[in-house]
Amino acid sequence: MDNRKIILAFYMVCSAVLWFLSRSLLEWLYHTFYAIRRYAAVGTLREIVPVILGALLFGFLFRNPKVNTVMDEVVSELKKVTWPGKDDVMKSTTVVIICILIASFILAGFDLLWGKVITFLLHT
């Protein structure tokens, strides 16, 4: 596997996201439910549990051969992709913005027109 550094970085990011989400959930539980704050070990658990969950996820991803195979294939396929250059991205973005503006003006015109028609029909 020549893609090991990229895969390990992905595993670390996944573990960090799980750490952050679980820590945020525990913080929310701590601040929302007063009964939880009565327990002395809650403060320590609030800090330790997310770290353990992140480490467990990293270990699971790192040790699972199926996940490693799939990730290696994904990285290999992404290396084959021909990514557009800056000029192509700028031109495509400009076209999309112009199309969105045109569609917005058309929809606004129809909305105004139907609003006038409905108002006319209701008042007559």
Image: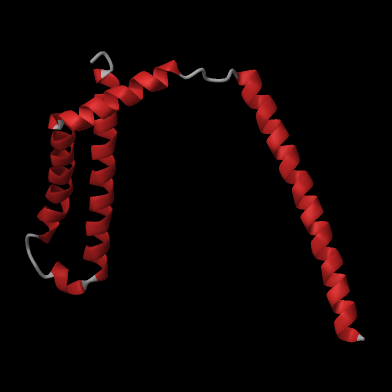
Q: Residue furthest top?
A: 2
User: Is 26 rendered above or below residue 72?
Assistant: below
Give the image quarter of residue 92.
top right
Residue under the point 16% across and 54% down? 46
Q: Position of residue 109 (x, y in %)?
A: 84, 58
* Quadrant housing the N terminus: top left
Query: On the picture, is 52 further left or further right than 122?
Result: left
Q: Nearer the viewer, residue 79 or 52?
A: 79
How many numbered discs, if any?
0
Q: Residue furthest right?
A: 124
Q: Residue furthest left?
A: 40
User: Is 47 rendered above or below residue 82?
Assistant: below
Residue under the point 81% across and 52% down? 106
Q: Position of residue 95 (x, y in %)?
A: 72, 33
Q: Position of residue 69 (x, y in %)?
A: 23, 26
Query: On the picture, is 108 further left or further right than 11?
Result: right
Residue under the point 90% across and 78% down? 120
